[in-house]
Amino acid sequence: MILFNYETDFELANESKTEQWISSIISEYGFEEGDINYIFCDDEYLLKLNVEFLKHDTLTDIISFDYTLGKLISGDIYISVERVKENALVFCQTLDNELNRVLIHGILHYFGYKDKTEVDIVTMRNEEDKCLAKFNKL
């Protein structure tokens, strides 16, 4: 089950389409959908989590806590709407496109994709692009 939670003044434009898209990606990659919670928040909220749990005193757009067991995908994905908005401007993207990229980025981490090395980053971006193309076809 995919749930969307809001800790800031923001709501997804189309929760059902987004949920359908994420569910289809999970299935296409050969995984099963468990309990996935998206928590939309602001920079301050996510910075506190980043410092407390990851010991990083920096702003970020996403932090994901992975509770996946085998092929059953579960976790909590925290997204700073402020960071996503700023990144959309920096990368010349629409807010919706950048938000969808971040939404699926967390799921791809649960599949085992990393983004620490240059090679990993390129692979992650390619997978994000494939998933985004599928969203646009719904």
Image (spheres, rainbow, N blue to C red):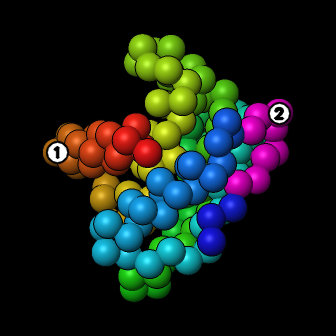
Helix, strand or loop at mark 2: loop
Q: Looking at the image, how many numbered discs can be counted on the residues?
A: 2
**Compared with residue 114, is residue 35 higher up or lower down, i.e. above or below?**
below
**Label 1 is placed on what type of residue?**
Val
Q: Is residue 8 magenta?
A: yes
Marks 2 & 1, CB-CB < 8 Å contact: no
| Number of the label disc, if any, that sits on residue 119 | 1
Q: Is residue 112 magenta?
A: no
- Of discs 2 and 1, which sits in the foreground? 2
Quarter of the picture holding the C terminus: top left
- Left or right: 12, with 7 as reference point: left
Q: Mark 2 points at which residue?
A: 9
**Compared with residue 111, is residue 96 higher up or lower down, i.e. above or below?**
above
Q: Distance between the residues labelled 2 and 1?
A: 36 Å
> Residue at coordinates 30% horizontally, 59% vertically from top-left?
113
- Left or right: 3, with 67 as reference point: right
Stretch of the chain drawn in magenta: 4-11
Measured as percent of width and height from the top left, residue 12 is found at 68, 40
Mark sitting earlier along the chain (2/1): 2
**Compared with residue 131, is residue 13 higher up or lower down, i.e. above or below?**
above
- Left or right: 125, with 84 as reference point: left
> Residue at coordinates 42% horizontally, 62% vertically from top-left?
24
> Residue at coordinates 63% horizontally, 71% vertically from top-left?
1
In the image, farthest residue toward the bottom: 70
**Label 2 is placed on what type of residue?**
Asp
Q: Which quadrant of the view contains residue 137?
A: top left
- Left or right: 88, with 120 as reference point: right
